[in-house]
Amino acid sequence: MFRLNYILALVFLFTWNNVLGQNIQVDAVTYSSQQLVEDFLINSGCIQNIQVTNTASGIFGGTEKSFGYFDANGSAFPFSSGIVMSTGKLRNVPGPNTNLSDDDAPGWTGDQDLETALGINNTTNATVIEFDFTTNADNISFRYLFASEEYQEGSPNTCLYSDAFAFLIKPIGGTYENIALVPGTNTPVLVTTVHSGIAGSCPPINEGFFEGYNGANVPINFNGQTKVLTAQTSVIPNQAYHIKLVIADEQNYRFDSAVFIEANSFNISANLGPDRSFRTENPLCDTETLVLDATPTTNTPLSFIWFQDGVLLPAETGPQITVSTAGEYSVALDFGGGCIATDAVLIEYSTNPIVQNVDFFQCEPMANGIAVFNLNDAIPNITIGDSSLRSVGFYTNLNDAQNGTNPIPNPVDYTNISADEVVYARISSEFGCTSIATITLKTTTNTLPPYYLVECSNSENNEFANFDLTDATSAINTDLGGNFTIQYFEEYEDAISVENILPTNFTNTESNFQILFIRISGDEGCLGISTLELTVIPTPQLGEAIDYTYCLDRFPETITIVSGVLGNPNDYTYLWSTGEITPTIEINSAENYTVTITQTTQANGINHNCSITNTITVSASELATFTYEITGNYGNQNIIITPIGIGDYVFALDDENGAYQESPIFENVRGGVHFIYVKDLKGCGIASQRIFVLDFPKFFTPNDDGFHDYWQILGLNSEDIQIKNIEIFDRYSVLIKTLNPTSRGWDGTFNGKLLASSDYWFVAYFTDGSEYRNHFTLKR
């Protein structure tokens, strides 16, 4: 067990040392600000009077800072050592990139000079190093890279947010200039100005200067970084200058950033101009030469030493050399006393465009070799289909084409001056490299046989149809055995001038029949003209839709449904979803029925069928059954009807032929015999029922005039008598009369004597055991 633990401990120690060796190291304590600038950043005899004048850092407690010294520590970091400035804690700068650097500190403010230089506001957490210097040369430069947590792979935030930094320089007493710029531009280096793009959010911008997004196994703790960049500017020798190196968060402290400046890179430099490379999109062309000039504006050096790809060029000792091959060219200007200015420039070559001479045809049968040509149409053939190449001019002689002078002013509408005239095309690549190709302008008198398309008319108008012209295109390419450009025109002149090209989905503009003109073109231009005859044949037309209803209660009776086609039914053939082939069918179920109606018409000696499909909906309904309920007080009761069935029903009381209502409720119905009627709106009939509504009269007048001579119950159903008997009392609760519900009623007498006008009380005893008490008036 001891031996195993010992081995594991050794493995752990070896692994830990390797991990440490993969990351940079930082130091905020050992070196003063003056040492960082004078001994590490500059360390050159070419720059004098170096004096640090100001620094700013986050105050985290103890010796913790936001800037300091870094060492690559054997890692793959591109700088072996230098100064790093961060918007967070210095100890969070080293890798691995496994946690978010997201620091803040009390009272850590922004920087106004940075905001002014970049045109922004509301910066915070600014780290600053400022120093003065003088130099004996006219250019200075230093190397740096920018890294940030705000580089977020796949996130649109990369397109929107960036911390800010700048390298500000000015003559003492002058105005600041920012030299931390995207090479060849005036654009500040930021997350939002140097990245590879985010799909769906923003395209790449200055992608050639973006190193990439960082995974976990990198020597620094930031999500992404730029390539190594150079800050460079011209200066006046022996003039005192002030530099302010500053980086800050913008808007809030979140997602820290850092700028790394290479040790010993701050030095005087020569100025060979910008790179001529693919990355900067300006390489030289095949046989082009370039003069590199290292002549300084002041202080002539003791010697010029030139290199190509790091190899000394011993024959080159002057301030200029002529470049004719690719490579990285560098120069060292020796001013004596150990002061050497250097610069390097990358030279790359792009090949001239590959082009071919072509014959280019135009169709013009009657012009004796003279026609109007669109010279641009010859470009795909000249460039052999290379879409990255373009024409920058057409010329009538080779000398003009080579010099780019006197181009043809209107190449899309050029009339040749003689049969088989030769003109010249100047073709350019994306980098401005050019080649010359000849175009021999020829005419052709080819005519091709006509083509035909027959199409069924639109359902709304029998004189017009929608034609798919690609059907003719397929037939033409099959006949000619190729894959040609086929274009369609309404006028012959348009086919010649290639104007007013018709869409491939075309509706005829002349009723029933129309002739179009076809232009057939290939790589060599127009090959011939043909015609396309469009014939419209009629499609069956439908009339207005008919609403059909099948009454379920009448099953298995049938009803007749018709196809719905207009015109003579015998002019068409039919196929129903039931399989029947007649103009009408008999059905006894409610569902959707489809019928395909076809008309056969002959065109160009061939029978063509045009069809239309009609869907006929048969809805279901039925004669209603219903129940009812009588509610409310006697004398003003309500009848509530509940229909049973799938129809749409309306309701009437007592008058079958009168007005029906949508509501199934009838209010304040007086007693007596009534009839309920429930009508189906789809025509399946009227259901009815006789009902009885009980009512106890409020008064009676026994004066033998034939009206209200008896007090009797209204609305009794003789087949289902609900009341056993009724007892009538005077106001002294004396029983006056007991009535049988089937009797004639009470005539207002007691023991043969007429009773006086008064209120009388009654009790009705129902067969279900319930009672009803009320009173009525006897009037004489």
Image (cartoon, grey):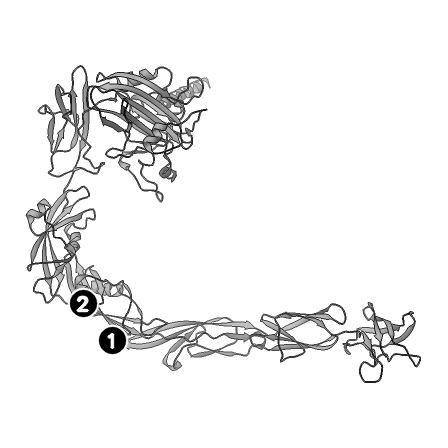
Q: Give the amino acid type for the residue marked by disc 1 in the picture.
A: Asn
Q: Earlier in the sequence, mark 1 or mark 2?
A: 2
Residue 408 location in percent, x, y? Answer: 12, 52
- In this view of the protein, which residue sits in the foreground, 349 or 162? 162
Q: Give the alpha-carbon distance from disc 1 to disc 2, as whole Å.
A: 23 Å
Mark 2 neighbour class, 10 Å CA radius: few under 14, some 14 to 19, many 20 or more: some
Eyeballing the image, is 195 above or below 294?
below
Q: Which residue sits furthest front?
A: 173
Q: Quadrant of residue 218?
A: top left
Q: Nearer the viewer, residue 674 or 57?
A: 57
The dot on residue 200 is: none
Q: Quadrant of residue 508?
A: bottom left
Question: Residue 702: image x %, image y %?
Answer: 85, 81
Residue that badge 2 annotates: 492
Query: On the picture, is 530 further left or further right than 182?
Result: left
Callout 1: few (<14), some (14-19), or many (20+) C-alpha neighbours within 10 Å? few
Would residue 316 be seen by someone viewing this image from the given angle?
yes
Numbered label tally:
2
Circle 1 sits on which residue? Answer: 604
Q: Position of residue 643 (x, y in %)?
A: 64, 70
